[in-house]
Amino acid sequence: MSTLRQILGHPDPVIAEVLETWTPRFLRGGTSVGDLVSTVDRMETWDDWVVEWTITAGVHETLAKHAESDGRRLAATAAWMDAFRCHHLAYFVSTRDLELHNRGLANMLRCHDNALPYLEPAVEKVEIPGVEGASRMVGLLSLPKGVDVAPVVIVLPGLDSTKETRHQSRGGWLRRGIAVLSVDGPGQGESSQWSTIRPDYEVAISGVIDWIETRADLDASRVGVFGTSLAGYYAPRAAAFEPRIVAAYGNCGPYDWGECFDALPQVTKEAYAHYSGAKSMTEARELADQLSLDGVASKISCPLLIVHGSDDPLIPWEQGKRIADEGGGQFMLIEGGTHGVQNMPHLFQSYALDWMTRYLGGAVS
């Protein structure tokens, strides 16, 4: 079997670009080095990506089923989660074969749903009605212990992440007394099966907060939004229009998606075309221009924190600086940080959680 260094130099240029861009995310998200190396080692071209990750996911599914038949619930849950991660990697930016893409999404949801009843901290899957023409959404909710009516942070996926991948980081929020609601909004994750990306993402967030107001265990007067990657556009965008948002955080998001579009990896352009509902790359490029905070960021009145990596290969850090400057927020530039600063989470993550917690009224000690 190859080494990690060897697969990072994969001869297929698309695979090499995907690994260079997202390996920190893969590893931080819980994918083992062994799974990453052995799976990529079997690939010859990008066309093998979905198939090989599906095979690796199948290994974990078999382990999960054997553990279940033996009555080993904890082992089965862990294996279902490993399978979910592999199925997510299989489909997340692979959209050339839509049958394989859709199957990968369905497999990811199935494996996560199998683990759902046994996850710790506990997770509730919820349906959120749409408003003002927005489609219904699906979320994952976790509540902190010992808090009767909890403040809540809405955690948003980016272009190709999902509520499941984002909700894995719920522990830090829960320990601070904050409820976590991770949402697949328009064109995201599970909701992408019936909706496409909306530049006016604030409409979706308004619907989410309307839903929060129906819950007796959530405090709709203490709501924050937390978004990474393309959600680093969605969160500030929502804060500019939705007065019920108490504080907003964005990580490596674009000020103007259209300005970034031409330099994106090819598979990311293809993923955006799919999730936006574009019929061609030309239309995708035109739709990208609609995702801009020009004339919008200045409307943000709540506290705002923007984090960006200096070495982000997808979104130049100057984009994040523009959001912070025009939104009157704080800007943190992490030297050497890649997209999402996944390679250096210790330099910002705890600070960001504490920053949001202070505004929402949780506990930092």
Image (cartoon, grey):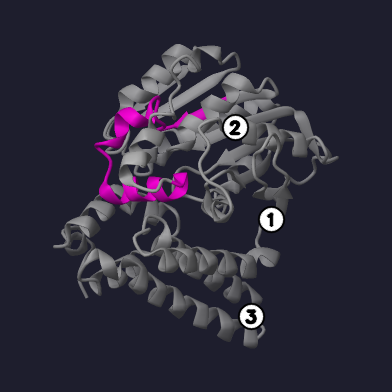
Q: Nearer the viewer, mark 3 or mark 2?
A: 2
Q: CA distance from mark 3 to mark 2?
A: 37 Å
Which amino acid type is shown beneath numbered disc 3?
Arg
Residue 36 magenta: no
Q: CA distance from mark 2 to mark 1?
A: 19 Å
Residue located 34% across and 47% down the image: 280
**Residue 81 x, y percent position in the rendering:** 54, 66
Mark 3 or mark 1, which has the lower sequence index?
Answer: 3
Which amino acid type is shown beneath numbered disc 1?
Val
Say what secondary structure mark 3 lies in.
loop
Which amino acid type is shown beneath numbered disc 2?
Val
Residue located 56% across and 56% down the image: 193
What residue does disc 1 label? 123
Find the magenta span and give its range: 248-277
Q: CA distance from mark 3 to mark 1?
A: 20 Å
Say what secondary structure mark 1 lies in.
loop
Say what secondary structure mark 2 lies in.
strand
Q: Is residue 210 above or below residue 276?
A: above
**Residue 225 x, y percent position in the rendering:** 60, 32
What residue does disc 3 label? 72
Label 3 neighbour load within 10 Å: few <14, some 14-19, many 20+: few
What residue does disc 2 label? 225
From the viewer's perspective, tell me whether residue 350 is left or right of residue 114. Answer: left
Q: Nearer the viewer, mark 3 or mark 1?
A: 1
**Residue 186 x, y percent position in the rendering:** 56, 43
> Exactly how many numbered labels are in the figure?
3
Q: Are marks 3 and 2 in contact (CB under 8 Å)?
A: no
